[in-house]
Image (spheres, rainbow, N blue to C red):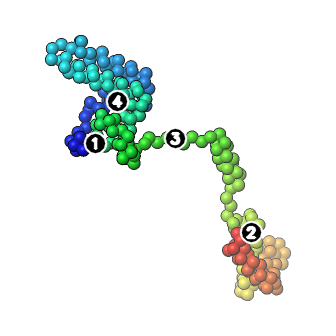
Amino acid sequence: MESILDYQPNAAEDYYALLGCDELSTPEQIQAEYRARVVGSHPDKAVGDEKDDAHQRFQLLQRAKEVLCDPALKRSYDAWRRAGIAVSFKDWIANQSVTQMSMHWASSKPKKAMIMGDEQIKEAEGAASVSAAQPTQSPWAPYSFDGLIVVALLLVCTCAYLKKVPRINSWLLSEKKGFFGIFYKAAVIGTRLHWAVSIVCAITALYAVFIR
């Protein structure tokens, strides 16, 4: 408990920074970085008071290389770094089983990319092609069957209503042939077969609300 309360982050335990690498570095890369740094830190090349510092740095580099090149130690070291708790790596190793169990939820595990299998990719492509081949369509599009029925009902009901307006009746609904003959016939249907038009309107409304 005292070691936890008195713990201070130590740069000597940042093995990746000591060797100039990261979690994704391969053992070969770690070994190469270690050799490049250990040459200038060897105690035999130090003179006078520098020997103690060189010896200490040499030991740190060796320890960093041993931990990062050992798969089991490297996994423990990475778990310790991700946990971010106030415990030295040495104490973490000494109490590894207890510490990892108590700090299970504190570790931020690295994310893994979700890889789709060949069958899943084919299914996704098939669904995309089907959806592309069947474009969405408004239920009342004028070029659909439902749309044609709605347009016809609106035309019949409107013309039947306008037939009772004298000025519009004499101007728009007086011609029985040609283009304006369409409006005349629609007005006649709406007037003479108003009961049938009402039934069709009711059926269309029920279809749109409960079935469509």
Pointer 3 local density, CA inside 10 Å: few below 14, some 14–19, many at least 20 = few
Residue that carries the numbered disc 1 in the rendered image: 86
Left or right: 185 as drawn, with respect to 53: right
Q: Earlier in the sequence, mark 2 or mark 4?
A: 4
The x and y percentages for residue 154 are: 72, 76
Q: At x 62% / y 40%, what residue is drawn?
A: 117
Image coords of residue 118 (percent x, y): 65, 39
The CA distance from mark 2 to mark 4 is 70 Å
Q: Quadrant of the N terminus?
A: top left
Q: Is residue 6 left or right of residue 99?
A: left
List the residue tagged with mark 4: 16
Under circle 2, the secondary element is helix
Instruction: Pick the residue in front: 142 or 89.
Output: 89
Residue carrying label 2: 146
For disc 3, the marked residue is 113
Q: Nearer the viewer, mark 1 or mark 4?
A: 1
Residue at 72 percent of width and 83 percent of height: 162
Residue 96 falls in image quadrant? top left
In x, y percent, where is residue 121?
A: 64, 43
Q: Amino acid at mark 1?
A: Ala
Question: What kind of residue is marked 3?
Answer: Ala
Q: Nearer the viewer, mark 3 or mark 2?
A: 3
Which mark is first along the chain, 3 or 1?
1
- Measure the alpha-carbon separation of dots 1 and 4: 19 Å
- Amino acid type, label 4: Tyr
Which of these two is toward me, 160 or 38? 38
Residue 20 visible: no
Closer to the chain start, of discs 1 and 2, is 1
Question: Vertical placement of 66 versus 168: above or below?
Answer: above
- Determine whether label 1 and label 4 are within 8 Å by CB: no
